[in-house]
């Protein structure tokens, strides 16, 4: 049923990353599917902002996050996993990746809202992906 699974992760949220990886692994094993791990780093969308950073700053960020994502893949999956690092706004970058990769399933995480008693809620990025993705979206709590 699902052949291509996209798993966008926020590397600053290790518990949710672990839950997403577990859910992706289970879905992939049932369907003999290919998994792609994605993380999105902030970009330099404005030239004035980019001017404050060295020319190779984005290459260094990309290399560092690729290494971190590779470690997440090694720690959480027994199968080969594709790695993707994008820069920009998270919701848009995830939706663009879904459109480009022809994914059947995207797994997206929630976040705890302490002002609501620790309830798990969809943030703006997760909500955008759930609303606009052209594939099935599984929300992981």
Image (cartoon, rainbow, N blue to C red):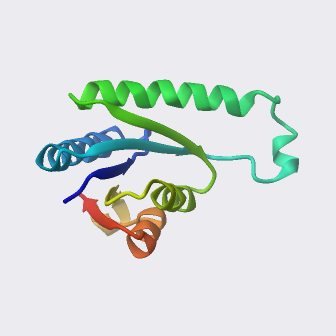
Residue at image position (35%, 30%) is 72
Q: In the rendered image of this protein, does residue 92 appear above or below residue 6?
A: below
Q: In this view, does 60 lie above or below 114?
A: above
Please tell me in which quadrant of the rendered image residue 104 appears. bottom left
Q: In this view, does 81 lie to the left or right of 100?
A: left
Residue at x 57%, y 44% (from the top left corner): 86
- Across and down, in percent, residue 140 comes to 25, 57
Q: How many labels does the image show?
A: 0
Left or right, 23 with respect to 71, comes to left
Closer to the camera in the image, 118 or 18? 18
* Residue found 68% across the figure and 29% down from its top: 59
On the rendered structure, is 74 left or right of 51? left
Quarter in which the C terminus is drawn:
bottom left
The spot of residue 96 in percent (x, y) is: 54, 59
Could you tell me residue 71's position as x and y percent?
A: 37, 24
- Residue placed most toward the observer, 33 or 111: 33
Q: Where's the N terminus, which quadrant?
A: bottom left
Tell me: 78 left or right of 44: left
Q: Vertically, is 58 above or below 110?
A: above
The furthest residue to the bottom: 131
**Could you tell me residue 90's position as x and y percent?**
54, 55
């Amino acid at each position: 049923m699902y052949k291509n699974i996209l798993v966008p992760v926020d590397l600053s949220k290790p518990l949710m990353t672990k839950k997403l990886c577990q859910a992706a692994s289970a879905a992939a094993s049932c369907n003999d599917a290919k998994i792609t791990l994605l993380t999105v780093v902030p970009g330099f969308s404005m030239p004035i902002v980019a001017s404050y950073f060295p020319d190779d700053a984005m290459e260094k960020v990309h290399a560092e996050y690729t290494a971190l994502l590779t470690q997440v893949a090694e720690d959480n999956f027994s199968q080969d996993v594709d790695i993707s690092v994008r820069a920009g706004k998270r919701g848009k970058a995830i939706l663009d990746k879904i459109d480009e990769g022809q994914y059947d399933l995207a797994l997206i995480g929630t976040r705890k809202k302490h002002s609501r008693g620790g309830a798990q809620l969809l943030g703006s990025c997760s909500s955008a992906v759930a609303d606009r993705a052209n594939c099935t979206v599984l929300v992981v709590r």
